[in-house]
Amino acid sequence: MQVIIKENYDEMSKEAAQIIRDAIHLKPNLVLGLATGSTPVGTYKELIRMYEEGELDFSKVVTFNLDEYVGLPPNHDQSYHYFMHDKLFNHININPANVHVPSGIAKDFAKYCQWYEDEIKKAGGIDLQVLGIGSDGHIGFNEPGTSLASRTSLVTLTEETIRDNSRFFEKEEDVPRFAITMGVGTIMEAKCCLLLANGEKKADPVSVLVEGPITSQVTASALQMHPNAIVIVDKAAASKLKRVDYYKWAYENRPRF
C-alpha cells in the first residue's frame, strides 16, 4: 500500500486527479470506478479543469459507480446518479453509453446486482477504482461486518451512516435505509484502488485502514491485501498514523523508472 500525505485537501485532490489523468493517457479506454460524497468533489473539479484545458479526453473512458440509494430515482437531487452528472459527467465529453451508475429503483435487485457484476466483467474489469472511506471505515456502502468477499448487493445502512449522510437531506428521516453497492470482493478485483480521505473525522478509520488489523468491522482494511492500493490523505486525516515519517520518505524516494 502506498500512502501519500498531502498538506491539505486541494493538494490531495490534485494528486488524485494527476493519477487518474496519467491512467487515461496510458489507456484512453480506461475502465474507471467512481465514488460519490464530498471527498472526491475536488478531484472531479480538477479533472474537469484538465478536460477544459485539453489535457484529457474522456470519449472512450468507461465508468462504474460504487453505489446508489435504494428508492431514489435518477433525477432525485440526492441520488448518486444526479450527483455524478452534476459534479462530473455534465462537464466532460464522456459517452453516456459508457456511464454506469447502479439503479436504486430496480424491480428485481438480485438479478440487477448480478447484471452489474456481469457488465463490469464484460468491460474487462475495473482498471482504477476511486474510493472514499466512511467514519466507521466502510468502502462503498459495505458497512461493518460485511464479508470481505462480498459482491454487488442490496445492503442495510447503519444508523451512523444515516446520521452522517443526513446533512445532505432536509431531515434524517429522509435518508434512505437501504443501498445497492459493489461488494468488497468486487472492489478488490480492480487493478488499482485509489482511496481518498481528508479531515480529522477520518483520522481513526484511516489509521485502521493503513495500520490496523484486517477486519470485516472496518471493510476498508481489506485494501491492505490489495496488490496496488494508493491512499491519499491530508495531514488531518493522517494525524493518527504511527509511521508518517516513513510514508513521506517512501513517497519522496519512490521509484521513477
Image (cartoon, helix red, strand yellow):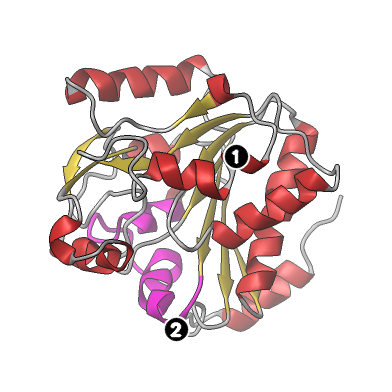
In the image, is residue 201 part of the stretch drawn in magenta? yes
Dominant SS of magenta comes to helix
Point 22% across, 44% down: residue: 147
Image position, residue 103 (x, y; %): 31, 30
Position of the N terminus by quadrant: bottom right
On screen, residue 220 versus residue 33, left or right, reads left
Amino acid under disc 2: Lys
What x and y, as percent, mark residue 92? 68, 38
Residue 162 visible in the displayed image:
yes
* Residue 24 higher or lower than 158, as above or below: above
Q: Label 1 is placed on what type of residue?
A: Asn
Give me the residue at 71% from left, 62% from top: 14
Task: Locate residue 90, reporting x and y percent.
Answer: 60, 39
Q: Which mark is residue 90?
A: 1
Task: Give left or right: position of 109 versus 227.
Answer: left
Query: What's the magenta region?
Result: 198-224
Write down the residue under mark 2.
240
- Nearer the observer, disc 1 or disc 2? 1
For the residue pair 13 and 238, the one nearer the viewer reads as 13
Instruction: State yes or no: residue 6 in magenta.
Output: no
Q: Is residue 103 left or right of residue 84?
A: left
